[in-house]
Each structure stands twice: as C-alpha cells, then as structure tokens.
Amino acid sequence: MIRFEDLLGKVRAYSPEGDLELLRKAYVFSALAHKGQVRHSGEPYLIHPLEVSDILADQRLDVVCVASGLLHDVVEDTLTTVERIRELFGPDVAHIVEGLTKISAIPFSSSEERQAENFRKMLLAMVDDIRVIFVKLADRLHNMRTLQFMPEEKRPRVAQETLDIYAPIANRLGMNKMKNELEELAFMHLEPQAFESLRARVDAKR
C-alpha cells in the first residue's frame, strides 16, 4: 500500500519546485472527507485516492493533477461541494474535480462499436483540461486492479466498459503502458479461462 510520504517523495523527485504543501493539504482533506468509508475490499476508502495519485505521479504529472487525484471522489461521495474545493485548493483543482464529477454522472449502456466511439468522442469533447482525463484513467486503472472485490455480477460490465471506452482513450493519448494493463485486466475478467490459458502459454515460452 502506498503511503502519503512515499507519494510526496516521488513528486518531489521530478517536481522539486511544485507546490508540495497543496499536495499535503489535499491528502489531509481527503482523509477527513472519506473518514469511515470503506472499499468493497474492506480497506479504508482513502487507499483508493492515494493509489490513483500514485499512478498520476508515475506519469510525472503536475502537482495540481496529483492533488486532484487525492480529491477526485470527494464531491461525488461526500458532502463536500465544488465551491469548497475551489475555496481551499484554487480554481484549477476545483475545475478538474468538477469535470470528473460530471463524467461520473454520464451513463454508458452500450458496447456496440459505434456507440462506444460516440461516447469516447463526447467524453473528450466535454473536457477542456486534459488532466481530467488523466485522473479518470488513473481512477479506472486502480478500480480494475481491485475489480475482484466488486460484486461478481458487476465485474463484466465494468470490464467491458473499460475495454470499450477507457483503454482506447489511453491508446489515443499515447499512454500505451496504461492501455495494455487496462486491456489485460478487462480480458482477465471477461474471459478468465482464455486468459489463464494464454498466460500459461506465455509463461512456458519465457
């Protein structure tokens, strides 16, 4: 499990001039806002925004983007308002968090190729700060890494949505490593037997 001090050190290494106090403030606020909430795994909810921000730090994204990762669920899942985020963290962080909240409210119900492409275009068109998409992809990646803890009946839908929407967006943005992991995790949940067979063949060749 990533610790905040590890995250701070990672960001400091590639952005020593960044506003690290903003990051610390976002962490404390997120910890208080999500206090008492737990994930399907039984772990404290705070682990999720920490892991999302760690994925963003691995991409060497700016402090505002990493701080937004720590706060990305507070408006949707707590009583916090966008206005409160703007007041405490400034307009850029508030704008990213608000964009993520709007994306979460959009229903996606069809895996038909044309519909999926339309949804991807709409998603990209409604975002005027690409950091919103970066945080959303990091959020989806961590959710896919922990998908086994979700109710079994929900996993295929989330995996299919990942394959249809988020992996292609990561690919379009040139984030090949993320795209590959999203596809692999989706495949593992959609076709578990085929996935295990393929993995066994790959391991044998190695």
Image: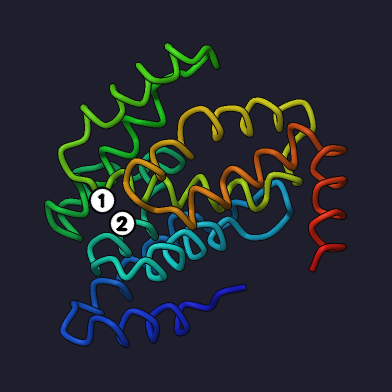
Residue 34 appears in the figure: yes
Q: Position of residue 83 (x, y in %)?
A: 19, 44
Image quadrant where one finds the N terminus: bottom right
Q: Determine whether 126 is above or below 74 in the image.
A: above
Point out which mark residue 68 bears: 2
Of the numbered discs 1 and 2, the one sitting upstream in the chain is 2
Compared to residue 75, the image places residue 7 above or below, namely below
Image spot of residue 152 (x, y percent): 79, 32
Q: Position of residue 114 (x, y in %)?
A: 43, 12
Residue shown at the point (59%, 42%) measured from the top left = 183
Residue at 23% from the left image edge and 46% from the top image edge: 130
Viewer-closest of 106 and 94: 106
**Could you tell whether 95 is left or right of 31 in the image?**
left
Q: Which mark is residue 205?
A: none
Cα gap from disc 1 to disc 2, whole angstroms: 9 Å
Q: Residues within 10 Å of mark 1 (few under 14, many from 20)?
A: many
Residue type, numbered disc 2: Ser
Write down the residue under mark 1.
Answer: 131
Pointer 1 with pointer 2, Cβ within 8 A: yes
Placement of the C terminus among the 4 image quadrants: bottom right
Horizontally, residue 73 falls left or right of residue 124, namely right
